[in-house]
Image (tube, grey):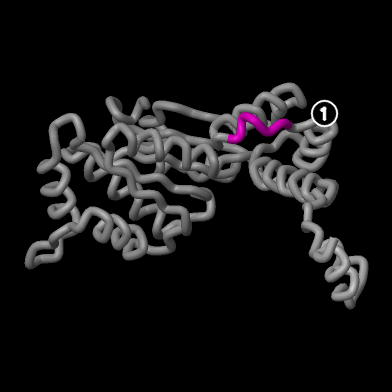
Amino acid sequence: MVLSFSDGIIKIIGREGSGKSVLTQLLSAELIEEDQEVVIFSDIPHSETELHSPIQQQLHLNLDDNNDFYVALNKHIQARPYDQQKLILVFDDADQIPEDCFDAIRMLFEKNYHDRPEVSMVFAGTELLDQKLNEPKNRTFNKNIILNFEVKPMNRSELEAFCNAYLVEMGLQKRRLTKEDIDGIYAETQGLPGKIPQLIFSILDQAEEKKQTAAPEIPTDKGIIGKLVTIDDDPEPELRRHLHQ
């Protein structure tokens, strides 16, 4: 992953339901596997406090007598192995972050851009994020973008490949989606991957229910006594006749 050895900004742009959240989750999981320190903001921070608090809690920062967040963050990251002296912040729906909080994010990036520790960021949002980053006051972000993703709708062939790959990723490679299933998913999503996992599991659940409903009941051998009870509510005479034969 590029942020494991480079510093800067990864920008992910896509319309609602395009799969930006899924992509940020995958990026975060890969970074964590590479022993990088990652703080994920799934919920939008609305203030400097809501920005700093998750970082402080997850990293267990010990603030000094002056409660200097930046000093504590610097000490924490400098104490890590050299190749892991980095913090990566991941913001989903970054285009919806209020201006005051976005200013605090920029301050955090700029403060650590000139000094150690290094703080890199992943921003995901709609085209409104581009407008926000293009504002003159945010030029520090713009000039430090090292990767720029645009999540676009898939065509049907790409969607089918995505669905099959997802089944493999989830350990469900023995399950199969029919042509009708793929057509239905494509019609429902128009090639946007955001809802695809939910639709796949819904299809698999429905197929399993139909399979169980259609399964014939396997008769069991109840034995002679069970058969007699089934035939006659009062089997004693018939039972005695069999026992005496």
Asked if the magenta segment contains residue 173, the reply would be yes
Image-based side of 101 in relation to 166, left or right:
left
- Magenta residues, start to end: 172-176
Image-based side of 232 in relation to 243, left or right:
right
Instruction: List the residue tagged with mark 1.
Output: 179
Position of residue 43 measured from the top left corner of the image (x, y, whole percent): 47, 58
Which amino acid type is shown beneath numbered disc 1? Lys
Numbered label tally: 1
Asked if residue 56 is positioned above or below residue 215 in the image, the reply reads below
The residue closer to the viewer here, 71 or 168, is 168
Residue at x 85% of width, y 75% of height = 236
Position of residue 83 measured from the top left corner of the image (x, y, whole percent): 18, 30
Asked whether residue 135 appears in the rendered view, the answer is yes
The residue closer to the viewer here, 128 or 149, is 149
Asked where in the image residue 194 lies, by quadrant, the reply is top right
Position of residue 54 measured from the top left corner of the image (x, y, whole percent): 32, 59
Asked where in the image residue 180 lies, by quadrant, the reply is top right
- Dominant secondary structure (helix, strand or loop) of the stretch shown in magenta: loop
